[in-house]
Amino acid sequence: MNKIHTLGQLSQDAFVYYVLGKKTDGFFVDIGAGIGGPEQEFYHGLDMSNTFNLEKLGWKGIAIDYDERWYDSVVGLRQCCLSCADLLEKNINEVLEEYDCPTECTYLSIDVDDAQEKVFNDFDFDKYRFDVITYETNCYFGDHMKEPTQQSRDKFKSFGYKLLFGGVGIEDNQPIEDWYVSEEIFDKHKHLFSDGITCGDAIKTVRKD
């Protein structure tokens, strides 16, 4: 398979696929797997999914969201472990333990809106290791997440992750996410490093590499 049909809002699934050398198996943890909320339009649980197409390739994983509508819309369609949990109330590590999450994983997606800061601070990065991490910062929206980009960057760096694409957005100068990889993967792609890039350009460069 040379291409992947992307569902991710910023093509996160395509990034993971190409940066890992078109990997067709792995284990993901998708935190904030649904789109929408009580005051937002509800999207079907497969819309803008960062992991559904990876699952179709043969990946396994855990997808977590607090919205019961999301759970109800995907429970018959997804093969991964599904957790409907409010991470403002529950510790993320308890959820991962409940579903026997392996300590060595492939991909972590953290995009959990109001619970972003809590999940980030709670997460046991000593216990759980990943090859690729996509992390929502939403810097473009000011201090909505109440967590400066540099704080998260320093923490990921302290755990050995390297920023490959920073300030990834749909349009120029609208940073939404930071994309990290392990040191080993970074060494293969470090010439692609960019801090401030559209998701489209990021995918083009990593796909050609």
Image: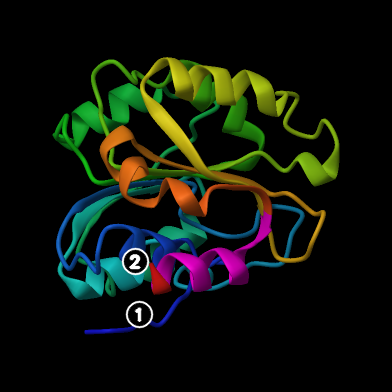
- Residue beneath the point at 50% across and 68% down: 205
Q: Position of residue 150 (x, y in %)?
A: 67, 23
Q: Closest to the observer: 193 or 200?
A: 193
- Residue beneath the point at 29% across and 23% down: 94
As drawn, 57 above or below 120:
below
Q: Magenta part mainly helix, strand or loop?
A: helix
Distance from the alpha carbon under mark 1 to that under mark 2: 9 Å
User: In the rendered structure, are the residues bearing label 1 and label 2 in contact, judged by CB atoms less than 8 Å apart?
Assistant: yes
Q: Which residue is mark 1?
A: 4
Quadrant in which the C terminus appears: bottom left
Q: Position of residue 157 (x, y in %)?
A: 46, 22
Q: Which residue is mark 2?
A: 18
Q: Quadrant of residue 21?
A: bottom left
Residue 30: in magenta span: no
Nearer the N terminus, badge 1 or badge 2? 1
Residue 206: in magenta span: yes
Q: Is residue 8 visible?
A: no
Q: Position of residue 151 (x, y in %)?
A: 63, 18
Q: Label 2 is placed on what type of residue?
A: Tyr
Secondary structure under the numbered disc 1 in the rendered image: loop
Highlighted range, magenta: 197-207
Secondary structure under the numbered disc 2 in the rendered image: helix
Q: Closest to the observer: 137 or 116?
A: 137
Q: Nearer the viewer, mark 1 or mark 2?
A: 2
Q: Quadrant of residue 46?
A: bottom left
**For residue 110, side relative to residue 198 (left or right):** left
Q: Quadrant of residue 159?
A: top left
Q: Residues within 10 Å of mark 2 (few under 14, many from 20)?
A: many
**Which residue reaches farthest right?**
142
As drawn, 139 above or below 155:
below
**For residue 75, side relative to residue 25 (left or right):** right
